[in-house]
Image (spheres, grey):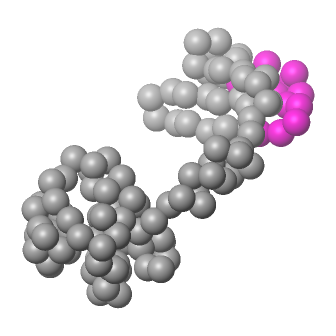
């Protein structure tokens, strides 16, 4: 069960197998019904799903670079400029033709906010 309270200035969650009704009632009285949501759905961690495990098994540094580059809306040339290499190097790294160097991996991991280990084999 998940109880979330959203107001313009505060947001917090209460998680547990069951959240006591008096806690939910407190939030509703304090913040109003429209600002409190209760979700009784059972959640499964992505890491526990077979599809995620398959994705992780097929993940390569190149696929990771391409994914995060596109998520940030960058072209290969823009990414190359940000990490200090040329566009062709980014292209080769994305196709897993060229390994990611340690310095480039560190720069990309900081840019993408991910572990450097995801970029080095």
- Image position of 74 with respect to 40: above or below: below
Per the rendered image, the range of residues in magenta is 15-27
Q: What residue appears at the point 62 percent right and 39 percent down from the top-left corner?
A: 12
Q: Does the magenta stretch include residue 109?
A: no
Residue found at x 31% / y 57%: 66
Q: Which of 40 and 60 is in front in this view?
A: 60
Q: Is residue 26 above or below residue 109?
A: above
Viewed as shown, does residue 31 lie left or right of 98? right
Please tell me whether residue 37 is drawn above or below residue 17 in the rendered image: above
Task: Decide if residue 10 is in sight here.
Answer: yes
**Residue 112 visible within the image:** no
Q: Residue 120 lies in what quarter of the image?
A: bottom left
Q: Residue 45, located in which quarter of the rendered image?
A: top right
Give the image location of residue 40, x and y in percent. Answer: 79, 23
Residue extending farthest to the front is 97
- What residue appears at the point 23 percent right and 70 percent down from the top-left corner? 92
Q: Position of residue 51 (x, y in %)?
A: 64, 44
């Amino acid at each position: 069960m998940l109880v979330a309270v959203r107001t313009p200035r505060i947001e917090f969650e209460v998680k547990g197998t069951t959240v006591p009704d008096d806690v939910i009632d407190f939030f509703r009285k304090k913040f109003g019904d429209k600002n409190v949501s209760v979700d009784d759905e059972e959640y499964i961690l992505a890491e526990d799903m077979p599809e995620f495990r398959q994705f992780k098994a097929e993940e390569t540094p190149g696929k990771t670079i391409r994914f995060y580059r596109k998520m940030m809306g960058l072209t290969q040339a823009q990414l190359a400029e940000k990490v200090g290499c040329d566009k062709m190097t980014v292209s080769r790294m994305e196709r897993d033709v060229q390994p990611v160097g340690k310095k480039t991996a560190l720069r990309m991991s900081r840019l993408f906010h991910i572990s450097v280990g995801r970029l080095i084999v």
